[in-house]
Image (tube, grey):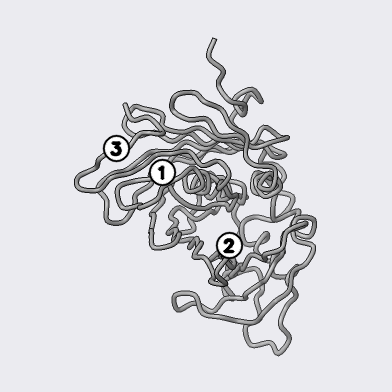
Amino acid sequence: MYAFGQSVRFGIARVNWLIEVAQISCLMMESSLVFAVIRRPNSHMIQRLGLALILIISSLAPTLAADSIGFQTATTQTPTALEIVERFIQAVGGRDAWLKTKTQYAAGTLEVIGSDNKITVEIYAKAPNLGLTIMKMGNNIISRFGFDGKKGWIQTQEGKIQDVPPEKQAGQKRDSDLYKYLHFKEHFPDSKVIGIKEVEGAKAYLIEATPAGEKFPELLYFDVRTGFLLLRDTGHEDGEGKRTVDLVYSYDYGEVDGIKLPLRLRILQGDTTILAKLTNVKNNLPMDDAIFSPVVSK
């Protein structure tokens, strides 16, 4: 059994699983569990990957044909940020259908490029803003973290429970909102369209959206043709004036129980690349609020 706080060898690489809660950041999303190729792993990376998957689940909605949402690629007038987000909502089902989804569950796998190690994840989400992610290596739970509606927390393999730092709580609350994009104006009161950029050959509207109460904006790329979210960039300037690399690419939007969502993610954090794949998604399963709190040993 691998324990956080230990140094574990995978082949020739050495991984330090030290929990550094002060570095936990809510992305959605988006980054990684620690494996052999990660030089300085910490709970920041674990947290962000789970939240990235939670974010995917939180953006599910009954499907509507993407080509029917009415993008005018030849128009001389660029739509506003709110119009682009509204088209995204329509692309994945529309507001009314979205609000009918009260809970979402997903299971999947995570793989770090350059490593043979894989983990499995289970993600639970419940309206309005409850979230839980469980990560396993083999049959061993290596991390649990979530948002109980009031605060974010992380629980190590040994059962130690720590709260997400106060400065990160707002971000985790935002990313745990099952209807995040329906509440876009509330979460991102300052947003604007920068222009049209290319994302892996596809034209995309680029929105710069600054979260409420935060300094650094997120960059959101929405496909001009389909309306889908292609890329989320949550990088920001570090202490040396350089922009950090925190990217989440979404692929293979597919229908699951009448809902369209990206079934694959490619996550770039620094020089690390993680591939995430959802293999089982279910909606409106019964979920007790109690599961979104840490497990306390008796």
Cα–Cα span, label 1 and label 3: 28 Å
* Label annotation for residue 263: none
- First in residue order: circle 2 vs circle 3: 3
Q: Regarding mark 1 in the picture, which secondary structure is present there?
A: strand
Q: Are marks 1 and 2 in contact (CB under 8 Å)?
A: no
Q: Residue at x 75, y 55 (%)?
A: 187
Locate residue 146, reporting x and y percent: 59, 35
As drawn, 296 above or below 151: above
Locate residue 213, reporting x and y percent: 77, 56
* Label annotation for residue 279: 1
Q: Is residue 13 left or right of residue 111?
A: left
Q: Residue furthest top?
A: 298
Residue that label 3 marks: 8
The image quadrant that residue 163 belongs to is: top right
As drawn, 111 above or below 269: above
The one nearer the camera, 115 or 215, is: 215
Locate residue 109, reporting x and y percent: 38, 44
- First in residue order: circle 1 vs circle 3: 3
Depth-wise, is mark 1 or mark 2 nearer the camera? 2
Residue that label 2 marks: 234
Q: Residue at x 60, y 69 (%)?
A: 222
Whether residue 206 can be seen here? yes
Q: Is residue 22 left or right of residue 177?
A: left
Tell me the kind of residue under disc 1.
Thr
